Image (spheres, rainbow, N blue to C red):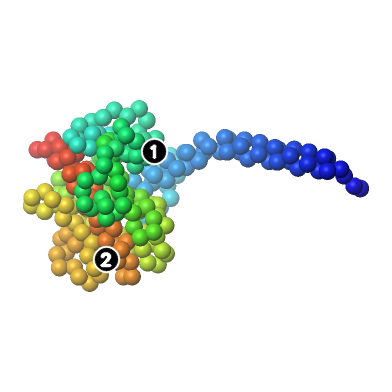
Amino acid sequence: MEFSNKYIVCFALALCLICSATVSSLAVVLKDKQEANKLLDKQMNVLRVAQLIETDEEPNPEKVTRIFEDIEVLTFDQATGNPVEIRNVWKFNPLKNSKTDEGGVDASDPRAKRVAIKRMPKTLLAYRVKTAGKECLVLPIYGNGLWSLLLGFLAIELDTSKVVGITFYEHLETPGLGGEIDNPNWKALWPGKLCFDEDGNPAVEVVKQGAVKNPATQVDGISGATITSKAVGNLVQLWLGDTGYGPFLRQQRGAQR
């Protein structure tokens, strides 16, 4: 059976319209579920870095919600540490917000250039864990490694200024090399490290593998991934500094006295 060119064109057009409508409908239907899964993943990473669940544990949403009853989300002005009201903290993205004129400021810390951050957020957020025996602050951190943007969390004890944990939940570093920043064995080197020196300056750092001289503040780098290792050290110090969470952390420590 032969078909005219007009019939073929109309049939192809109709098929394209049907497929487009189907894809669009599925995207709308699945959007809420995708957003819920994204939020759940973020919450589980907060719980892992705060040592509230095991690294390989996959708790159900009900358990995550229950644990988060002891976690407070704080939003605050970067320069002063004073509270800032955000209508929906779970949708607030400091990285995205920093790219706007009103939400960010040009980065001045030299360490920002080393991790390719051009602008720093004017408003930040942190998670205050109030679970007995696990009290800490979880700080979102980010910066560029060798090949990609590293998105993660750093958890610290406010009273001792020691690292509780670190994790990177999103990156595209080379598997087996820079990708080892998310290896449990490497992340296990971080807990207990002092974040600041006696003058309050960021002190925790990543050094070349085998070059650790001060175990209190230095973390062994990853073999074959010098650039990514240094990037992690630089971005951690950047976010602990005065253009990151520094003012907020000082205010929080002062409130405890």
The spot of residue 89 in percent (x, y) is 35, 33
Q: Place residue 65 in its image quadrant.
A: top left
Q: Amino acid at mark 1?
A: Thr
Q: Name the residue at the left extreme.
A: 198
- Depth check, mark 1 against mark 2: the one in front is 2
What residue do we see at 61% from left, 37% from top?
24
**Residue that badge 2 annotates:** 221
Question: Quick check: can you spot residue 225?
Answer: yes
Q: Which residue is mark 1?
A: 65
Q: Residue at x 37, y 67 (%)?
A: 177
Classify mark 2: helix, strand or loop: loop
Q: Please say whether residue 66 is visible from this viewpoint.
A: no
For this view, does 166 lie left or right of residue 214? Answer: right
| Distance Cα–Cα, label 1 vs label 2 | 35 Å
Q: How many marks?
A: 2
Q: Under tag 1, what secondary structure? A: helix
State the image coordinates of residue 71 (x, y, percent, origin top left): 30, 38
Look at the picture and state if 169 lies above or below 126: below
Residue 253 numbered mark, or none? none
Q: Quadrant of residue 252?
A: top left
Residue most toward the right? 1
Left or right: residue 124 compared with residue 17: left
Query: x, y (%) of residue 204?
Result: 19, 56
Classify mark 1: residues with Cα within 10 Å, few (<14), some (14-19) or many (20+): some
Residue appearing at x 15%, y 60% in the figure: 216
Disc 2: CA contacts within 10 A as few (<14), some (14-19) or many (>=20): many
Q: Quadrant of the C terminus?
A: top left
Q: Residue furthest front?
A: 5
Q: Amino acid at mark 2?
A: Gly
As drawn, is 15 to the left or to the right of 47?
right
- Identify the residue at image location x=13%, y=35%: 255
